[in-house]
Amino acid sequence: MKDVLVISEIHDRMQQSLERIEGYQFHFYANFFEVPNELKEKIEIYIGAPKKEEVDELPNLKWVQLVFAGANTYGWLQEDILLSNAKGGYGKGIAEHMLGITLMAEKYFLSYYDQQKENQWKPIPEVKLISEAKILSVGMGDIGSEYLKRCHMLGATCFGVRRNKHEKPDYVEALYTMNELDEILPECDVVALSLPETNETKQLFDLERLRKMKKDAILINVGRGSAIVEKDLLTVLKEGYFHLVALDVCEIEPLPQNNPLWNADRVFITPHISGRFTSVANYKNVMKVICDNLENYLKEDRPKYLVNRKLGY
């Protein structure tokens, strides 16, 4: 029997799914400090989001299975410990969040809601169609790809940006590399970011790049808050840029109460919820990744979605 430590916000819901897998002894805890010292000696697998000080107390740990896709903060993990993420578990759920934001912005729903609170009956002219929009996904992993698939089905012209040259999928008009981002950026009505945090993506959207976008564009970020320089974003908002900026991620989370983004015009903030287990689909997909990996590991196969430590994903 291999001992598995499970520490997750949904550990109660995970229990039944995991305990169906033979060959493992699962130990469920809400917090690491509740784990008995004698058990720490036995743990071979950690499912959750361990901290360095926790891993240091697990002398026989061989594999960390994250419950999320982002792994950029695990550069400290020893190379002899396997690290896998939940890649593929969140794409559909986050893509629907992004699509909802896109339609909400295109149809001026937030403006109508503001009018409602003031008892105003005032139609807004020139509502846009998504079928007439050029939509750019900066990041073409599972999340960005699922988003563009949905936009394409609604008639949008879709473009993608990824790290390296790659074969173009049918739902994309053209693919660009990160070095070519500025070629397509000024043309797009919607720019959606679903990037991991790497040296290449940090502060990617600074003042210069934000000013290259259409003034009435929609900017969506569901990847990492570090991709946008927030002080530069506030600057261009004051200059009249953007129809809507939708942020599900911020540079500092939770976003401090005194941060000016809270009260900035044309900014819509959600508290990093697009990829949480509040979506049943996200939960089911992540559980499938974890269960498949456990089955593979028992057969002495390497788990899927091993993280490239240099890239951080």
Image: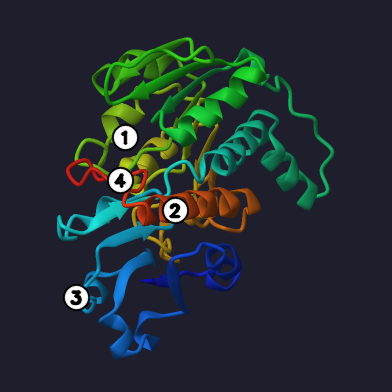
Q: Which residue is disc 1 drawn over?
A: 205
Towards the viewer: 72 or 17: 17
Residue 145 showing in the rendered view: yes
Q: Residue at x 47, y 69 (%)?
A: 8
Choose the circle earlier in sequence order: 2 or 3: 3
| Sequence-wise first label, 3 or 4 | 3
Residue type at mark 3: give it.
Pro
Which numbered disc flags the more N-terminal residue, 2 or 4? Answer: 2
Q: Amino acid at mark 2?
A: Glu
Residue on which disc 2 sits: 295
| Mark closest to the chain's N terminus, 1 or 3 | 3
Q: Are marks 4 and 1 in contact (CB under 8 Å)?
A: no
For marks 2 and 3, give the CA distance.
23 Å
Camera-side residue of 215 and 164 = 164
Mark whose residue sits in front, 2 or 3: 2
Q: Which residue is mark 3?
A: 59
